[in-house]
Image (cartoon, rainbow, N blue to C red):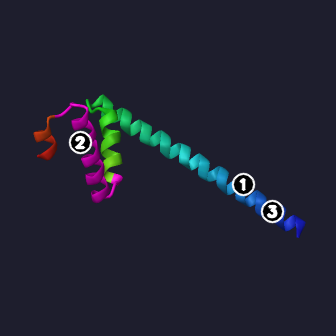
Amino acid sequence: MHAVARNQLRAFIERIERLEEEKKTVADDIKDVYGEAKSMGFDSKILRKVIAIRKQDADERMEQEAVLDTYLQALGMIPADDAEA
C-alpha cells in the first residue's frame, strides 16, 4: 500500500509539473500576441480590458457599469445627463 501511495503521489506531481509547463507556454504565447498587437498600434491595456469585459455575463457587466457611472457622477467626473444616457 505504501508503494502504491508513493507512485500515485509521484504521478500527481509529474502531471502537475507538466501542466505548469503548459501553462507557462500558453502564458508566453499570450504575451507574444499582446506584443504583436502593440507593435501594430493597439493599446495592450485596453485589449486586456476588452478581454475581461467579454468574459463577463451581460447582466454583470451592465451592473458594474451602472455602479461605475454612479461613483463617477458622485465624484463630479461625469455630468448627471451622461450617466443617464
Is the C-beta separation of discs 2 and 3 under 8 Å?
Answer: no
Classify 10 Å Cα crowding around label 2: few (below 14), some (14-19), many (20 and above).
some
Which residue is label 2 attached to? Answer: 69
Numbered range of the magenta stretch: 55-78
* Residue 42 tag number: none
Q: Position of residue 70 (x, y in %)?
A: 24, 42
- Quick one: label 1 or label 2, which is nearer the N terminus? 1
The residue that appears at 25% across and 53% down in the rendered structure is 62
Q: Position of residue 33 (x, y in %)?
A: 38, 39
Which residue is label 3 attached to? Answer: 7
Q: Position of residue 31 (x, y in %)?
A: 43, 37
Separation (CA) of disc 1 from disc 2: 47 Å
Total labels drawn:
3
The residue that appears at 29% across and 32% down in the rendered structure is 43
- Secondary element under disc 3, as helix, strand or loop, is helix
- Secondary element under disc 1, as helix, strand or loop, is helix
Q: Quadrant of residue 1?
A: bottom right
- Quick one: label 3 or label 1, which is nearer the N terminus? 3
Q: Outermost residue, bottom direction?
A: 1
* Residue 13 tag number: 1
The residue that appears at 49% across and 39% down in the rendered structure is 28
- Secondary element under disc 2, as helix, strand or loop, is helix
The prevailing secondary structure element of the residues shown in magenta is helix
Q: Amino acid at mark 2?
A: Asp
Magenta-span inclusion, residue 65: yes
**Left or right: 32, with 49 as reference point:** right
Q: Quadrant of residue 80?
A: top left
- Quick one: label 2 or label 3, which is nearer the N terminus? 3
Q: Outermost residue, right direction?
A: 2
